[in-house]
Image (cartoon, helix red, strand yellow):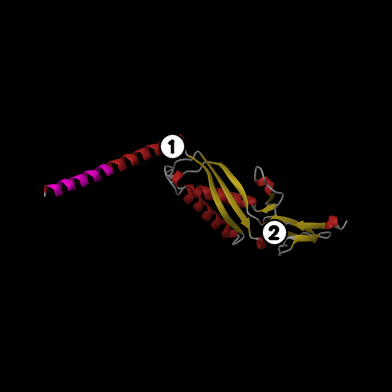
Amino acid sequence: AALSACTQIDTGNVGVERTLGKVSPEALPPGIYFTLFKTVDEFSAKEVSFQLQDMTPKSRDNLTMKDVDIDIYFKVNPSAVPGLFTKYQGDVVRHSDMVREGGTNDLVIAYSRVSREAREAVYKAIAQLEATTMHTRRSELAELVRSGLQKELDANDKGAFVITAVNVRNLLTDPAIEAAIRQRAETDQAIEKKRKEIELAKAEAERLIVEAE
């Protein structure tokens, strides 16, 4: 009976204690807690990830992307979990519900808010880049998403969330845009070839002048 009234908080997680519906403001560190007269919910304070898939945002040149898939990695400040739980009690999911496979039973707070802000950050970031050159600027796109998302989360919950990484997994443009990208690359190569020919011609002309003198 005593064992059944105990709850264990694993390493990397924190507990949120509730007594008669009242949430304690202090996060519980890993350990075993007697919960006969109270409830302790275990929340993840480790880095977790989720995927944003099948997005079709518009680029700066007003072209619609065919398919954009991005991975978001974030974690929650352990000391902020009780306050977030009070604020977002209706926004709690298990990590296994966030990912297709490999998830845990740990609870994640404010997932819907983070994912919603992440999607908005992706659309804003892609709107700053041109579709014809975006595939060469994946690192810049990832940083735009990360910084934009961090700024939005800090606006309402300063220091509660940390966006640890953003991975641009898939970045497909419309077939017509792909053709334009190839044409632009071919044009750039042709221009570079002509530039080298002009430089060689100038060098040869200078050599002939020197030789004549």
Indicate whether residue 152 is drawn in magenta: no
Secondary structure of the magenta portion, mostly? helix
Residue labelled with disc 1: 178
Q: Could you tell me which residue is drawn at 57 percent across and 55 percent down? A: 164
Kindly identify which numbered label has been placed on residue 86: 2
> 115 above or below 161?
above
Residue 166 in the figure: left or right of residue 207: right
Amino acid found under the numbered disc labelled 1 = Glu
- Badge 2: residue crowd in 10 Å (few <14, some 14–19, many ≥20): some
Magenta span of residues:
195-211
Residue 64 percent coordinates (x, y): 47, 40
Task: Work out whether 211 lies above or below 5.
Answer: above
Q: How far across and down, in percent of the image, does residue 202 sit?
A: 21, 46
Alpha-carbon distance for marks 1 and 2? Answer: 48 Å
Give residue 88's position: percent from left, percent from top. Answer: 67, 55
Q: Earlier in the sequence, mark 1 or mark 2?
A: 2
Residue that lies at the very extreme toward the front in this rendered image:
211
- Count neighbours of disc 1 (C-alpha within 10 A) and say few if under 14, some if 14 to 19, many if 20 or more: some
Please name the residue shown 57% across and 47% down the image: 71
On the image, the x and y values in percent for residue 101 come to: 66, 43
Q: Which residue is at a point 87% across and 58% down the rendered structure image?
A: 2
For residue 2, the mark is: none
Q: Identify the residue at horizontal 21%, vertical 47% (top origin).
A: 203
Q: Residue 42 is drawn in which quadrant?
A: bottom right
